[in-house]
Image (cartoon, coloured by chain):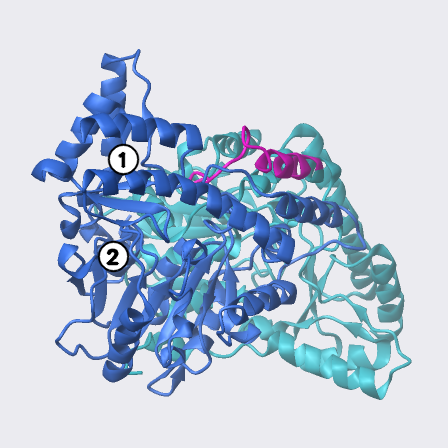
Chain colours: A blue, B cyan
Amino acid sequence: MNVKVNANYLNLKKNYLFSEIARRVAEYSSANPQKRIVRLGIGDVTLPLTPSVTGAMAQAVAEMGKKETFQGYPPSYGYDFLLKAISAHYASYGADIGTDEIFVSDGAKSDAGNITDIFGSNPVLITDPVYPVYFDSNVMAGNAVTFIPANRRNGFLPPPPSEKINGALIYLCSPNNPTGAVYDKAGLKAWVDYANDTGSLIIYDSAYEAYIKGDLPHTIYQIEGARGCAVEICSFSKTAGFTGVRCSWTVVPRTLVSGGVNIAGLWARRQATKFNGVPYIVQRGAEAALSERGYAECMDLVGYYMENARVISELLTRKGIYFTGGECAPYIWMQCPGGLSSWEFFDMLLEKAQVVGTPGAGFGANGEGYFRLTAFGTREDTYEAVRRLETVI
Amino acid sequence: MNVKVNANYLNLKKNYLFSEIARRVAEYSSANPQKRIVRLGIGDVTLPLTPSVTGAMAQAVAEMGKKETFQGYPPSYGYDFLLKAISAHYASYGADIGTDEIFVSDGAKSDAGNITDIFGSNPVLITDPVYPVYFDSNVMAGNAVTFIPANRRNGFLPPPPSEKINGALIYLCSPNNPTGAVYDKAGLKAWVDYANDTGSLIIYDSAYEAYIKGDLPHTIYQIEGARGCAVEICSFSKTAGFTGVRCSWTVVPRTLVSGGVNIAGLWARRQATKFNGVPYIVQRGAEAALSERGYAECMDLVGYYMENARVISELLTRKGIYFTGGECAPYIWMQCPGGLSSWEFFDMLLEKAQVVGTPGAGFGANGEGYFRLTAFGTREDTYEAVRRLETVI
């Protein structure tokens, strides 16, 4: 063939992180078959769907099997019943988001990756360490990326740069993956002001908002000025255990206009052309997750994981190890003790405690010397991991 | 805001087709409230999911509600059980497609729209009339499109152009939407030879393959040489009534290489970065649709719609009106009688028979003077429409 490929793809680095982890674990296991490995590296939920959700989905399956209640093509941007439930969820945080500003989709990853499609070539600001999709999708689009370092000095919550970069796309994730750090209102306001000041757009990923306790912002639309400079991507994956169900949404306020072009109109056109909506069955499950009973069940899931986070955090506090996250996020981002590098610490934990986590260096240059533990394991595994960590760190 | 948007989006024409149809029907209905409208314009299925499918999905919902059987993130390219079922489906047509060449996704529209992402700027050949996604997604990518006219002279099955256009992306759909025309092996072989001769890539949409009877090719991989020049997009939407369930797949043979770059590798990277897999529940339903019992049920759905197509085709044959489709496709593409334009015929049918179809001009310049009827209505509505058409054409 003699077809030109997208040459930007050739600039992508292969992400060896999880395959390298798997390789080292397999090697250790085959040399030490009697040792039981405990995994705190998992980024996926482990608890099953709740009764409200499975009940609603079972009913939706039955409806799809009857002529009178069968549903064909879903609306491109989501059924009204789900748009209303999501709009009400925002209202519960004091944010006024219309149903015509919400675009339901099959995953936050899809939307975070696809959103470059509606933009031209702009400067891109991404915090480091980072969820790889933000970076890789911009490499695919051929955009120049500037990393904003997140580190111990700024508590892994970097403020906007001093330099005013005009018309940038700015990716923020709070609660953050991988660091678990959460912006407070002042911290987020600084970014909103910076974006409005420079004519930039914030792409705000709030996938872990359900893990927030207290007064921290759940959505960027709790910040004054955000409707003029921010889209928000959120998901049912970590709130309702939907990683295998696939449902998320993106908010594009109708007030977002650049060069006379309405951004919501562009996203609407993109989605109507390159996407065909989320399954009826899934949307009924998502609606149920946002019902009063369903959301209480979701909070039980979150509570289970956060108890795991608490025992890990408590150990690290007791040991005097610096970390972020764990309080309002299912991730704990710890400094490797003894000045070890991310991978040295990984190997040490595997050898001495048979505990597997994720080397921070895999999430970007500023992740070196750090290590991510997650709260998504079972209670028993988490307790066991903490007992083992106790003896080696 | 001062962010550059993708300026190609501003070159998109708004597609007024279905909104204009809705407007004219609403206007007529409000002026004639006592008249019952019969719709043969519908492009969506109307029969419910079959028992095999709903049974498998109900079981999958139950599994998702139990800790021992809960499924988190699906594999990026599909569960093995479904990949094997799709591979076996190809084997039933004599085509050898490995499970590592199949990429399960949420819809043929998604894949047809997203595939431009992995290519650079190439000449694009699209048959006209056309499913709008092929064209719009290339406008979004800023690609120059050459239309290949499909018309009565070539039976709406255009052969490759005489000019050798090198390194082109060629979009083919067979059975065709909107014309219902189906390439035979010789017709498809001419395109495969052209593509191999010019180093071009065929993007082959076989979403309606289940409607084929007899010896016509169900997949482009029944044609010698296709593994060197073609990807294929197929779907459960029209085979199993999955328009509201959302499951499809794209085949990218490992043998497709351009400039030393493996195309399957590019698509794998795109999907792993900008997509997160299809719901477990949906994939279990899709697997069931390809089981022996499930596929027999699908053939009952297809048979129901094809009986509708038969009665419409019979009428047109009796009236001596030229048409394509209806024999191996759920679409009937008829020449407007009396030299009427597409919209004149639309208005006449609405006024005199209260039957609604789709003006061919809405699918491209070569659709002018033609009209699309579909077989997706109920039996009663279809019979009623045929009775009414009988009297006015």
User: In the image shown, does B335 or A243 lie closer to the viewer?
Assistant: A243
Residue at 81% over, 82% down: B29
Q: Quadrant of residue A188?
A: bottom left
- Residue A110 visible in the snapshot: yes
Name the disc covering residue A36, or none: none
User: In the image shown, does B360 or B74 lie closer to the viewer?
Assistant: B74
Residue at 64% over, 43% down: A51
Residue A299 versus residue B333 in the image, above or below: above
- Residue A16 visible in the snapshot: no
Q: Is residue A160 left or right of residue A374?
A: left
Q: Is residue A202 left or right of residue B220?
A: left
Is residue A157 magenta-colored? no
Sequence-earlier tag: 1 or 2: 2
Write down the region rendered in magenta. Answer: B55-77
Residue B109 versus residue A304 in the image, above or below: below
Q: Is residue A146 left or right of residue A258?
A: left
Q: x, y (%) of residue B144?
A: 35, 70
User: In the image shown, does B257 or A233 lie closer to the viewer?
Assistant: A233
Q: Quadrant of residue B141?
A: bottom left
Q: Residue furthest top?
A: A34
Q: Residue furthest front?
A: A318
Q: Look at the numbered disc 1 and give the secondary structure of its residue.
A: loop
Q: x, y (%) of residue B60?
A: 62, 36
For marks 1 and 2, give the CA distance: 22 Å
User: In the image shown, does B83 or B193 lie closer to the viewer?
Assistant: B83
User: Mark 1 sits on what residue?
Assistant: A357
